[in-house]
Protein backbone atom coordinates (compact mmCIF):
# COMPACT_ATOMS: atom_id res chain seq x y z
CA UNK A 1 0.00 0.00 0.00
CA UNK A 2 1.24 3.49 -0.77
CA UNK A 3 2.52 5.54 2.14
CA UNK A 4 0.31 8.31 3.44
CA UNK A 5 2.64 11.00 2.12
CA UNK A 6 2.17 9.74 -1.46
CA UNK A 7 -1.63 9.92 -1.33
CA UNK A 8 -3.89 12.90 -1.94
CA UNK A 9 -6.55 12.82 0.80
CA UNK A 10 -9.85 14.50 -0.10
CA UNK A 11 -12.68 14.67 2.46
CA UNK A 12 -16.15 14.81 0.89
CA UNK A 13 -18.88 16.67 2.80
CA UNK A 14 -22.43 17.32 1.70
CA UNK A 15 -26.09 17.27 2.54
CA UNK A 16 -28.02 14.00 2.29
CA UNK A 17 -29.04 13.49 -1.33
CA UNK A 18 -26.42 15.78 -2.86
CA UNK A 19 -24.88 12.83 -4.70
CA UNK A 20 -21.53 12.11 -2.98
CA UNK A 21 -21.65 8.40 -3.76
CA UNK A 22 -22.57 9.02 -7.40
CA UNK A 23 -19.81 11.62 -7.65
CA UNK A 24 -17.23 9.13 -6.36
CA UNK A 25 -18.31 6.54 -8.93
CA UNK A 26 -18.32 9.17 -11.68
CA UNK A 27 -14.83 10.43 -10.76
CA UNK A 28 -13.48 6.88 -11.01
CA UNK A 29 -14.76 6.72 -14.59
CA UNK A 30 -13.67 10.26 -15.51
CA UNK A 31 -10.11 9.47 -14.47
CA UNK A 32 -10.07 6.07 -16.17
CA UNK A 33 -11.64 6.72 -19.58
CA UNK A 34 -11.22 9.49 -22.12
CA UNK A 35 -14.74 9.39 -23.56
CA UNK A 36 -18.22 8.21 -22.64
CA UNK A 37 -18.24 5.80 -25.57
CA UNK A 38 -15.03 4.19 -24.30
CA UNK A 39 -16.55 3.77 -20.82
CA UNK A 40 -19.76 2.37 -22.31
CA UNK A 41 -17.89 -0.35 -24.19
CA UNK A 42 -16.07 -1.61 -21.11
CA UNK A 43 -17.10 -2.96 -17.72
CA UNK A 44 -18.83 -0.42 -15.50
CA UNK A 45 -16.45 1.00 -12.92
CA UNK A 46 -17.90 1.70 -9.49
CA UNK A 47 -16.80 1.82 -5.87
CA UNK A 48 -20.23 2.16 -4.34
CA UNK A 49 -23.34 0.10 -5.12
CA UNK A 50 -26.16 2.21 -6.53
CA UNK A 51 -29.90 1.89 -7.01
CA UNK A 52 -32.32 4.18 -8.85
CA UNK A 53 -35.41 4.11 -11.06
CA UNK A 54 -35.85 5.06 -14.72
CA UNK A 55 -38.96 5.16 -16.88
CA UNK A 56 -39.21 4.18 -20.50
CA UNK A 57 -41.35 5.83 -23.19
CA UNK A 58 -44.40 3.95 -21.86
CA UNK A 59 -43.71 5.23 -18.34
CA UNK A 60 -42.94 1.73 -17.16
CA UNK A 61 -40.55 1.79 -14.22
CA UNK A 62 -37.25 -0.03 -14.44
CA UNK A 63 -35.16 -0.33 -11.27
CA UNK A 64 -31.43 -0.09 -11.93
CA UNK A 65 -29.40 -1.73 -9.17
CA UNK A 66 -25.64 -2.18 -9.26
CA UNK A 67 -24.51 -4.46 -6.44
CA UNK A 68 -25.41 -3.83 -2.78
CA UNK A 69 -23.67 -3.17 0.52
CA UNK A 70 -24.71 -2.89 4.18
CA UNK A 71 -22.84 0.45 4.23
CA UNK A 72 -25.24 1.92 1.67
CA UNK A 73 -28.97 2.54 2.13
CA UNK A 74 -31.51 3.64 -0.43
CA UNK A 75 -34.47 4.87 1.63
CA UNK A 76 -35.55 8.42 0.65
CA UNK A 77 -34.16 11.08 2.98
CA UNK A 78 -31.71 8.72 4.68
CA UNK A 79 -28.01 9.18 4.11
CA UNK A 80 -26.95 6.55 1.55
CA UNK A 81 -23.54 6.16 3.17
CA UNK A 82 -23.84 4.83 6.72
CA UNK A 83 -20.20 4.95 7.83
CA UNK A 84 -17.03 6.70 6.78
CA UNK A 85 -15.33 4.79 3.96
CA UNK A 86 -12.25 5.61 1.90
CA UNK A 87 -11.71 4.84 -1.79
CA UNK A 88 -8.33 4.79 -3.48
CA UNK A 89 -7.95 5.50 -7.19
CA UNK A 90 -5.15 6.58 -9.46
CA UNK A 91 -4.52 9.10 -12.23
CA UNK A 92 -1.15 8.51 -13.79
CA UNK A 93 1.32 8.35 -10.91
CA UNK A 94 -1.04 10.17 -8.55
CA UNK A 95 -2.93 8.18 -5.92
CA UNK A 96 -6.13 9.81 -4.71
CA UNK A 97 -8.05 8.81 -1.59
CA UNK A 98 -11.67 9.96 -1.61
CA UNK A 99 -13.14 9.79 1.89
CA UNK A 100 -16.89 9.39 1.76
CA UNK A 101 -18.90 10.54 4.77
CA UNK A 102 -22.55 10.12 5.82
CA UNK A 103 -24.69 12.96 4.50
CA UNK A 104 -25.67 15.93 6.63
CA UNK A 105 -29.38 16.42 7.22
CA UNK A 106 -30.56 12.85 7.81
CA UNK A 107 -34.35 12.82 8.24
CA UNK A 108 -34.03 10.26 11.03
CA UNK A 109 -33.10 13.05 13.40
CA UNK A 110 -30.44 15.47 14.50
CA UNK A 111 -28.74 12.87 16.70
CA UNK A 112 -27.58 11.06 13.54
CA UNK A 113 -26.00 14.24 12.21
CA UNK A 114 -24.32 14.93 15.54
CA UNK A 115 -22.96 11.39 15.74
CA UNK A 116 -21.73 11.53 12.14
CA UNK A 117 -20.12 14.92 12.72
CA UNK A 118 -18.26 13.67 15.77
CA UNK A 119 -17.13 10.53 13.93
CA UNK A 120 -15.87 12.63 11.04
CA UNK A 121 -13.91 15.00 13.28
CA UNK A 122 -12.33 12.06 15.07
CA UNK A 123 -11.48 10.40 11.75
CA UNK A 124 -9.91 13.59 10.40
CA UNK A 125 -7.69 13.76 13.46
CA UNK A 126 -6.24 10.37 12.51
CA UNK A 127 -5.20 11.41 8.99
CA UNK A 128 -1.57 12.27 8.46
CA UNK A 129 -2.59 15.17 6.21
CA UNK A 130 -5.49 16.60 4.24
CA UNK A 131 -5.10 17.90 0.72
CA UNK A 132 -8.64 19.17 0.33
CA UNK A 133 -12.03 19.33 1.98
CA UNK A 134 -14.55 19.09 -0.84
CA UNK A 135 -17.99 20.49 -0.04
CA UNK A 136 -20.63 19.14 -2.43
CA UNK A 137 -23.73 21.22 -3.12
CA UNK A 138 -26.62 21.30 -5.54
CA UNK A 139 -27.22 24.42 -7.66
CA UNK A 140 -30.33 26.56 -7.37
CA UNK A 141 -30.61 25.97 -3.63
CA UNK A 142 -31.65 29.37 -2.37
CA UNK A 143 -31.74 28.33 1.27
CA UNK A 144 -29.64 25.87 3.25
CA UNK A 145 -31.28 23.57 5.75
CA UNK A 146 -30.73 24.43 9.41
CA UNK A 147 -28.90 21.14 9.96
CA UNK A 148 -26.56 21.65 7.01
CA UNK A 149 -25.77 25.18 8.12
CA UNK A 150 -25.19 24.07 11.72
CA UNK A 151 -23.06 21.00 11.02
CA UNK A 152 -20.98 22.50 8.24
CA UNK A 153 -20.09 25.56 10.28
CA UNK A 154 -19.09 23.46 13.26
CA UNK A 155 -16.98 21.13 11.15
CA UNK A 156 -15.13 23.97 9.43
CA UNK A 157 -14.58 25.97 12.59
CA UNK A 158 -13.02 22.96 14.31
CA UNK A 159 -10.42 22.36 11.64
CA UNK A 160 -7.03 24.00 11.84
CA UNK A 161 -7.14 27.43 10.21
CA UNK A 162 -4.50 26.33 7.70
CA UNK A 163 -7.12 24.15 6.01
CA UNK A 164 -8.98 27.26 4.78
CA UNK A 165 -6.93 27.40 1.57
CA UNK A 166 -7.63 23.73 0.89
CA UNK A 167 -11.42 23.94 0.85
CA UNK A 168 -13.04 23.43 -2.54
CA UNK A 169 -16.65 23.39 -3.71
CA UNK A 170 -18.11 20.81 -6.08
CA UNK A 171 -21.57 21.53 -7.45
CA UNK A 172 -23.43 18.46 -8.73
CA UNK A 173 -26.41 18.21 -11.11
CA UNK A 174 -25.44 21.52 -12.72
CA UNK A 175 -26.60 20.78 -16.25
CA UNK A 176 -29.88 22.50 -15.36
CA UNK A 177 -27.99 25.63 -14.23
CA UNK A 178 -25.66 25.70 -17.24
CA UNK A 179 -22.77 24.38 -15.15
CA UNK A 180 -22.84 27.22 -12.64
CA UNK A 181 -23.69 27.36 -8.89
CA UNK A 182 -27.01 28.96 -9.78
CA UNK A 183 -29.10 30.31 -6.92
CA UNK A 184 -26.87 28.59 -4.35
CA UNK A 185 -24.18 31.20 -4.93
CA UNK A 186 -25.58 34.00 -2.76
CA UNK A 187 -26.60 32.02 0.37
CA UNK A 188 -23.27 30.20 0.29
CA UNK A 189 -21.35 33.48 0.07
CA UNK A 190 -23.41 34.77 3.01
CA UNK A 191 -22.68 31.70 5.14
CA UNK A 192 -18.96 31.84 4.38
CA UNK A 193 -18.91 35.50 5.34
CA UNK A 194 -20.63 34.71 8.66
CA UNK A 195 -17.92 32.26 9.72
CA UNK A 196 -15.06 34.42 8.49
CA UNK A 197 -12.79 36.05 11.03
CA UNK A 198 -9.59 38.05 10.91
CA UNK A 199 -7.58 34.83 10.77
CA UNK A 200 -10.05 32.52 9.04
CA UNK A 201 -11.35 33.10 5.53
CA UNK A 202 -12.52 30.49 3.00
CA UNK A 203 -12.01 31.55 -0.62
CA UNK A 204 -14.88 31.10 -3.06
CA UNK A 205 -13.87 31.87 -6.64
CA UNK A 206 -13.18 30.37 -10.03
CA UNK A 207 -10.10 28.56 -8.73
CA UNK A 208 -11.79 26.42 -6.09
CA UNK A 209 -15.34 26.10 -7.48
CA UNK A 210 -16.14 23.22 -9.83
CA UNK A 211 -19.44 22.41 -11.54
CA UNK A 212 -20.26 18.96 -12.89
CA UNK A 213 -23.21 16.79 -13.80
CA UNK A 214 -22.78 13.11 -13.00
CA UNK A 215 -25.86 11.80 -14.81
CA UNK A 216 -23.50 10.19 -17.32
CA UNK A 217 -22.58 7.62 -14.67
CA UNK A 218 -26.25 6.75 -14.20
CA UNK A 219 -26.45 6.42 -17.97
CA UNK A 220 -23.55 3.94 -17.89
CA UNK A 221 -25.18 2.02 -15.04
CA UNK A 222 -28.52 1.83 -16.84
CA UNK A 223 -26.84 0.88 -20.13
CA UNK A 224 -25.00 -1.97 -18.37
CA UNK A 225 -28.43 -3.30 -17.30
CA UNK A 226 -29.86 -3.18 -20.82
CA UNK A 227 -31.85 0.06 -20.61
CA UNK A 228 -32.17 1.74 -24.03
CA UNK A 229 -31.78 5.48 -24.63
CA UNK A 230 -32.60 7.45 -27.79
CA UNK A 231 -29.89 9.23 -29.77
CA UNK A 232 -30.75 12.67 -28.40
CA UNK A 233 -30.37 11.42 -24.81
CA UNK A 234 -27.02 9.80 -25.60
CA UNK A 235 -25.81 13.02 -27.22
CA UNK A 236 -26.74 15.00 -24.08
CA UNK A 237 -24.96 12.48 -21.85
CA UNK A 238 -21.85 12.72 -24.02
CA UNK A 239 -21.81 16.52 -23.67
CA UNK A 240 -22.29 16.17 -19.93
CA UNK A 241 -19.45 13.64 -19.75
CA UNK A 242 -17.05 15.82 -21.73
CA UNK A 243 -17.72 18.88 -19.61
CA UNK A 244 -17.72 17.04 -16.28
CA UNK A 245 -14.64 14.93 -17.03
CA UNK A 246 -12.61 18.04 -17.94
CA UNK A 247 -13.79 19.77 -14.79
CA UNK A 248 -12.99 16.76 -12.64
CA UNK A 249 -9.43 16.52 -13.97
CA UNK A 250 -9.04 20.26 -13.49
CA UNK A 251 -10.18 19.85 -9.88
CA UNK A 252 -7.67 17.05 -9.22
CA UNK A 253 -4.88 19.10 -10.78
CA UNK A 254 -5.85 22.06 -8.58
CA UNK A 255 -5.87 19.94 -5.41
CA UNK A 256 -2.51 18.46 -6.40
CA UNK A 257 -1.06 21.97 -6.57
CA UNK A 258 -2.13 22.81 -3.01
CA UNK A 259 0.14 22.38 -0.03
CA UNK A 260 -1.18 19.55 2.15
CA UNK A 261 -2.34 20.50 5.61
CA UNK A 262 -0.75 18.29 8.29
CA UNK A 263 -3.25 16.99 10.81
CA UNK A 264 -1.20 15.13 13.41
CA UNK A 265 0.69 17.10 15.98
CA UNK A 266 -1.79 19.98 15.83
CA UNK A 267 -3.29 20.39 19.27
CA UNK A 268 -6.94 20.94 18.51
CA UNK A 269 -10.25 19.37 19.32
CA UNK A 270 -9.41 16.66 16.79
CA UNK A 271 -6.02 15.96 18.34
CA UNK A 272 -7.69 15.60 21.73
CA UNK A 273 -10.18 13.15 20.21
CA UNK A 274 -7.27 11.24 18.71
CA UNK A 275 -5.54 11.03 22.08
CA UNK A 276 -8.67 9.82 23.82
CA UNK A 277 -9.38 7.35 21.02
CA UNK A 278 -5.89 5.88 21.27
CA UNK A 279 -5.21 6.13 24.99
CA UNK A 280 -8.62 6.18 26.68
CA UNK A 281 -9.00 2.54 27.67
CA UNK A 282 -5.26 2.07 28.26
CA UNK A 283 -5.16 5.04 30.64
CA UNK A 284 -7.75 3.37 32.84
CA UNK A 285 -6.09 -0.04 32.51
CA UNK A 286 -2.75 1.38 33.61
CA UNK A 287 -4.32 3.26 36.52
CA UNK A 288 -5.86 -0.03 37.68
CA UNK A 289 -2.62 -1.93 37.10
CA UNK A 290 -0.70 0.62 39.17
CA UNK A 291 -3.16 -0.01 41.99
CA UNK A 292 -2.55 -3.74 41.56
CA UNK A 293 1.21 -3.14 41.60
CA UNK A 294 0.88 -1.26 44.89
CA UNK A 295 -1.26 -4.12 46.21
CA UNK A 296 1.49 -6.60 45.29
CA UNK A 297 4.00 -4.50 47.26
CA UNK A 298 1.64 -4.34 50.25
CA UNK A 299 1.13 -8.10 50.21
CA UNK A 300 4.87 -8.69 49.94
CA UNK A 301 5.51 -6.39 52.89
CA UNK A 302 3.01 -8.36 54.98
CA UNK A 303 4.69 -11.59 53.89
CA UNK A 304 8.11 -10.28 54.95
CA UNK A 305 6.89 -9.44 58.44
CA UNK A 306 5.24 -12.83 58.70
CA UNK A 307 8.58 -14.51 57.91
CA UNK A 308 10.75 -12.48 60.29
CA UNK A 309 11.23 -15.41 62.67
CA UNK A 310 11.87 -18.00 59.96
CA UNK A 311 15.25 -17.04 58.57
CA UNK A 312 15.36 -19.48 55.64
CA UNK A 313 11.90 -18.45 54.51
CA UNK A 314 12.80 -14.80 54.96
CA UNK A 315 15.98 -15.05 52.84
CA UNK A 316 13.92 -16.38 49.91
CA UNK A 317 11.68 -13.30 50.13
CA UNK A 318 14.36 -10.61 50.21
CA UNK A 319 13.43 -9.18 46.86
CA UNK A 320 11.34 -6.33 45.46
CA UNK A 321 8.42 -7.27 43.16
CA UNK A 322 8.53 -4.68 40.34
CA UNK A 323 5.50 -4.56 38.05
CA UNK A 324 6.04 -3.55 34.44
CA UNK A 325 3.79 -3.56 31.43
CA UNK A 326 3.86 -4.74 27.84
CA UNK A 327 1.47 -4.38 24.93
CA UNK A 328 0.18 -7.51 23.22
CA UNK A 329 -2.32 -7.92 20.40
CA UNK A 330 -5.04 -10.51 20.10
CA UNK A 331 -6.66 -10.95 16.68
CA UNK A 332 -9.75 -12.86 15.65
CA UNK A 333 -12.30 -12.87 12.85
CA UNK A 334 -16.07 -13.02 12.95
CA UNK A 335 -17.93 -14.22 9.87
CA UNK A 336 -20.81 -11.84 9.48
CA UNK A 337 -21.95 -8.79 7.53
CA UNK A 338 -21.05 -5.59 9.36
CA UNK A 339 -20.38 -1.98 8.48
CA UNK A 340 -17.77 0.51 9.60
CA UNK A 341 -14.38 1.88 8.66
CA UNK A 342 -10.97 0.56 9.63
CA UNK A 343 -8.45 3.07 10.82
CA UNK A 344 -7.25 1.12 13.80
CA UNK A 345 -10.39 1.86 15.77
CA UNK A 346 -13.70 0.42 16.86
CA UNK A 347 -16.74 2.49 15.85
CA UNK A 348 -19.71 2.90 18.17
CA UNK A 349 -22.82 5.05 18.38
CA UNK A 350 -21.84 6.58 21.73
CA UNK A 351 -18.90 8.76 22.70
CA UNK A 352 -15.97 8.50 22.08
CA UNK A 353 -17.45 6.95 18.87
CA UNK A 354 -14.04 5.55 18.00
CA UNK A 355 -12.06 3.55 20.57
CA UNK A 356 -8.51 2.31 20.27
CA UNK A 357 -8.88 -1.43 19.98
CA UNK A 358 -7.01 -1.66 16.70
CA UNK A 359 -9.65 -2.27 15.26
CA UNK A 360 -12.62 -3.02 13.32
CA UNK A 361 -12.29 -3.70 9.61
CA UNK A 362 -15.33 -3.16 7.43
CA UNK A 363 -15.98 -6.08 5.14
CA UNK A 364 -19.03 -7.50 3.48
CA UNK A 365 -18.18 -11.07 4.44
CA UNK A 366 -16.41 -11.00 7.80
CA UNK A 367 -15.05 -8.65 10.43
CA UNK A 368 -11.46 -8.73 11.67
CA UNK A 369 -10.66 -7.55 15.19
CA UNK A 370 -7.29 -6.88 16.77
CA UNK A 371 -7.53 -5.97 20.43
CA UNK A 372 -4.68 -4.18 22.15
CA UNK A 373 -4.07 -5.66 25.60
CA UNK A 374 -1.89 -4.08 28.30
CA UNK A 375 -0.39 -7.02 30.18
CA UNK A 376 1.46 -6.65 33.51
CA UNK A 377 4.42 -8.80 34.42
CA UNK A 378 6.22 -8.91 37.75
CA UNK A 379 9.99 -9.16 38.11
CA UNK A 380 11.35 -10.11 41.52
CA UNK A 381 14.54 -8.11 41.95
CA UNK A 382 16.68 -9.47 44.85
CA UNK A 383 18.85 -7.39 47.15
CA UNK A 384 22.07 -9.39 46.97
CA UNK A 385 23.75 -7.27 49.65
CA UNK A 386 21.63 -8.68 52.46
CA UNK A 387 20.89 -12.24 51.36
CA UNK A 388 22.75 -14.86 53.35
CA UNK A 389 23.90 -12.37 56.01
CA UNK A 390 21.02 -12.86 58.46
CA UNK A 391 22.08 -14.55 61.68
CA UNK A 392 20.02 -12.75 64.29
CA UNK A 393 16.62 -11.23 64.92
CA UNK A 394 18.14 -7.77 64.67
CA UNK A 395 19.66 -8.50 61.25
CA UNK A 396 16.33 -9.92 60.10
CA UNK A 397 14.49 -6.74 61.09
CA UNK A 398 17.16 -4.58 59.42
CA UNK A 399 16.88 -6.62 56.21
CA UNK A 400 13.10 -6.36 56.20
CA UNK A 401 13.23 -2.62 56.82
CA UNK A 402 15.74 -2.12 54.00
CA UNK A 403 13.49 -3.96 51.54
CA UNK A 404 10.43 -2.05 52.78
CA UNK A 405 12.24 1.29 52.41
CA UNK A 406 12.98 0.43 48.78
CA UNK A 407 9.38 -0.70 48.24
CA UNK A 408 8.15 2.59 49.72
CA UNK A 409 10.16 4.43 47.06
CA UNK A 410 8.65 2.17 44.39
CA UNK A 411 5.14 2.68 45.79
CA UNK A 412 5.63 6.43 45.58
CA UNK A 413 6.83 6.12 41.97
CA UNK A 414 3.67 4.18 41.07
CA UNK A 415 1.51 6.78 42.82
CA UNK A 416 3.33 9.63 41.07
CA UNK A 417 2.73 7.94 37.70
CA UNK A 418 -0.95 7.54 38.57
CA UNK A 419 -1.13 11.27 39.36
CA UNK A 420 0.29 12.12 35.92
CA UNK A 421 -2.07 9.64 34.20
CA UNK A 422 -5.08 10.91 36.15
CA UNK A 423 -4.24 14.53 35.37
CA UNK A 424 -3.96 13.68 31.67
CA UNK A 425 -7.37 11.97 31.72
CA UNK A 426 -8.93 15.02 33.37
CA UNK A 427 -7.32 17.47 30.95
CA UNK A 428 -8.41 15.44 27.93
CA UNK A 429 -11.96 15.20 29.25
CA UNK A 430 -12.29 18.88 30.12
CA UNK A 431 -10.74 20.11 26.86
CA UNK A 432 -13.11 17.93 24.85
CA UNK A 433 -16.11 18.93 26.94
CA UNK A 434 -15.37 22.62 26.38
CA UNK A 435 -15.04 22.26 22.62
CA UNK A 436 -17.16 19.33 21.43
CA UNK A 437 -20.51 19.87 19.71
CA UNK A 438 -22.19 17.33 21.96
CA UNK A 439 -22.39 17.26 25.72
CA UNK A 440 -20.28 14.13 25.63
CA UNK A 441 -20.11 11.48 28.30
CA UNK A 442 -17.04 11.20 30.49
CA UNK A 443 -15.28 8.30 28.77
CA UNK A 444 -12.68 7.82 31.51
CA UNK A 445 -15.21 7.65 34.33
CA UNK A 446 -17.26 5.21 32.23
CA UNK A 447 -14.20 3.01 31.69
CA UNK A 448 -13.44 3.06 35.43
CA UNK A 449 -17.02 2.11 36.26
CA UNK A 450 -16.94 -0.71 33.70
CA UNK A 451 -13.68 -2.04 35.12
CA UNK A 452 -15.08 -2.04 38.65
CA UNK A 453 -18.21 -3.88 37.49
CA UNK A 454 -16.07 -6.50 35.75
CA UNK A 455 -14.07 -7.02 38.95
CA UNK A 456 -17.28 -7.35 41.00
CA UNK A 457 -18.88 -9.82 38.58
CA UNK A 458 -15.81 -12.04 38.57
CA UNK A 459 -15.35 -11.88 42.37
CA UNK A 460 -12.18 -9.91 41.82
CA UNK A 461 -9.84 -8.15 44.21
CA UNK A 462 -12.03 -6.35 46.76
CA UNK A 463 -9.15 -4.10 47.77
CA UNK A 464 -8.64 -3.13 44.12
CA UNK A 465 -12.34 -2.27 43.77
CA UNK A 466 -12.08 -0.13 46.90
CA UNK A 467 -8.99 1.63 45.54
CA UNK A 468 -10.68 2.27 42.18
CA UNK A 469 -13.62 3.83 44.02
CA UNK A 470 -11.12 6.17 45.66
CA UNK A 471 -9.66 6.94 42.22
CA UNK A 472 -13.10 7.93 40.91
CA UNK A 473 -13.66 10.21 43.90
CA UNK A 474 -10.25 11.80 43.40
CA UNK A 475 -10.90 12.12 39.66
CA UNK A 476 -14.14 13.99 40.27
CA UNK A 477 -12.61 16.30 42.88
CA UNK A 478 -9.66 17.17 40.65
CA UNK A 479 -11.94 17.70 37.66
CA UNK A 480 -14.16 20.11 39.60
CA UNK A 481 -11.14 22.29 40.36
CA UNK A 482 -10.36 22.85 36.67
CA UNK A 483 -12.17 25.63 34.84
CA UNK A 484 -10.49 25.39 31.44
CA UNK A 485 -7.69 23.55 29.66
CA UNK A 486 -5.38 25.05 27.07
CA UNK A 487 -3.88 23.30 24.02
CA UNK A 488 -0.47 23.72 25.66
CA UNK A 489 -1.68 21.70 28.67
CA UNK A 490 -2.89 18.91 26.37
CA UNK A 491 0.55 18.76 24.75
CA UNK A 492 2.18 18.87 28.19
CA UNK A 493 0.13 15.88 29.39
CA UNK A 494 0.90 13.89 26.25
CA UNK A 495 4.64 14.49 26.66
CA UNK A 496 4.53 13.54 30.34
CA UNK A 497 2.73 10.28 29.59
CA UNK A 498 5.33 9.02 27.12
CA UNK A 499 8.28 9.60 29.49
CA UNK A 500 6.81 7.81 32.51
CA UNK A 501 9.27 5.33 33.99
CA UNK A 502 7.05 2.24 34.03
CA UNK A 503 4.22 2.89 31.54
CA UNK A 504 5.71 5.56 29.27
CA UNK A 505 6.85 3.12 26.60
CA UNK A 506 3.32 1.74 26.38
CA UNK A 507 1.79 5.19 25.85
CA UNK A 508 4.47 5.98 23.29
CA UNK A 509 3.78 2.76 21.39
CA UNK A 510 0.03 3.44 21.38
CA UNK A 511 0.54 6.97 20.05
CA UNK A 512 3.02 5.91 17.37
CA UNK A 513 1.08 2.87 16.18
CA UNK A 514 0.75 3.01 12.41
CA UNK A 515 -2.84 2.89 11.21
CA UNK A 516 -4.21 1.32 8.07
CA UNK A 517 -7.09 2.47 5.92
CA UNK A 518 -9.31 -0.16 4.38
CA UNK A 519 -9.27 1.57 1.00
CA UNK A 520 -11.49 0.04 -1.65
CA UNK A 521 -9.67 0.03 -4.97
CA UNK A 522 -10.54 -0.61 -8.61
CA UNK A 523 -8.36 -2.68 -10.90
CA UNK A 524 -8.63 -0.59 -14.05
CA UNK A 525 -6.38 0.62 -16.84
CA UNK A 526 -4.96 3.97 -15.74
CA UNK A 527 -4.59 6.90 -18.09
CA UNK A 528 -2.46 10.00 -17.69
Image (cartoon, grey):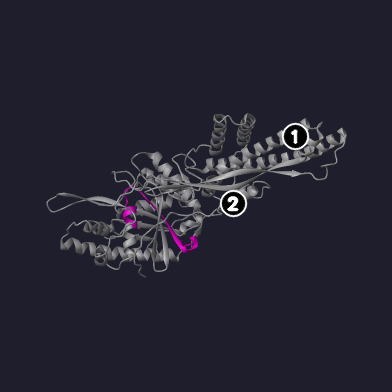
Give the answer, above or below, for where 161 lies relative to 351: below
Does the magenta-highlighted stretch encompass residue 18?
yes
Residue 146: say if magenta: no
Work out whether mark 2 precedes mark 1 in sequence or the reverse, and give the earlier one: 1
Is the residue 421 above or below the residue 232 in the image? above
Q: Secondary structure at mark 1?
A: helix
Residue 370: give x, y in percent of width and height.
Answer: 50, 47
Q: Which quadrant of the structure image shows residue 232?
A: bottom left
Q: Where does the image place residue 119, in percent across and percent down from the top left?
A: 45, 46
- The numbered disc on residue 301 is 1
Relative image position of residue 210 (x, y in whole percent):
35, 60
Depth check: give the residue in front, 108 or 337.
337
Look at discs 2 and 1 and give the one toward the viewer. Answer: 1
Q: Report if residue 268 is visible in the image.
A: yes
- Depth check: give the residue in front, 58 or 13: 58
**Mark 2 surroundings within 10 Å by alpha-carbon count, few (fewer than 14), some (14 through 19), many (20 or more):** few
Q: Which residues are magenta?
A: 1-24
The residue wearing badge 2 is 509
The residue located at (63%, 47%) in the rendering is: 497
Name the quarter where the C terminus is drawn.
bottom left
- Answer left or right for 251 relative to 432: left
Report the Cα–Cα distance between label 2 and label 1: 33 Å
Residue 188 point in image, percent of width and height: 37, 52
> Is disc 2 placed on a helix, strand or loop?
helix
Amino acid sequence: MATSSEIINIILLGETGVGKSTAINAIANYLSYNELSEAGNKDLLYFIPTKFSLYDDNLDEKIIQIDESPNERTEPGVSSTQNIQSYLLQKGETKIRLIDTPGIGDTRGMQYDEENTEKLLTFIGELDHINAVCILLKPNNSRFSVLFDYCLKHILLRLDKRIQSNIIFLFTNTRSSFYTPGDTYLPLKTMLKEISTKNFFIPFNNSNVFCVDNESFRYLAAKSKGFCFNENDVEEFEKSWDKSARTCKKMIDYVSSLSATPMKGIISINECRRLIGRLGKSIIQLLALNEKAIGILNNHEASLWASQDTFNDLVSKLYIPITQYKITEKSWSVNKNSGGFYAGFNVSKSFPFISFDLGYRHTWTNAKFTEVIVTPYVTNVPDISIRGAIESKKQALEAIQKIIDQMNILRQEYRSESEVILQAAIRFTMFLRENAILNVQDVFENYLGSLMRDESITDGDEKLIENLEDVIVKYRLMKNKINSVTPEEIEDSKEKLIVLKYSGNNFKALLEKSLEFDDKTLDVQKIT
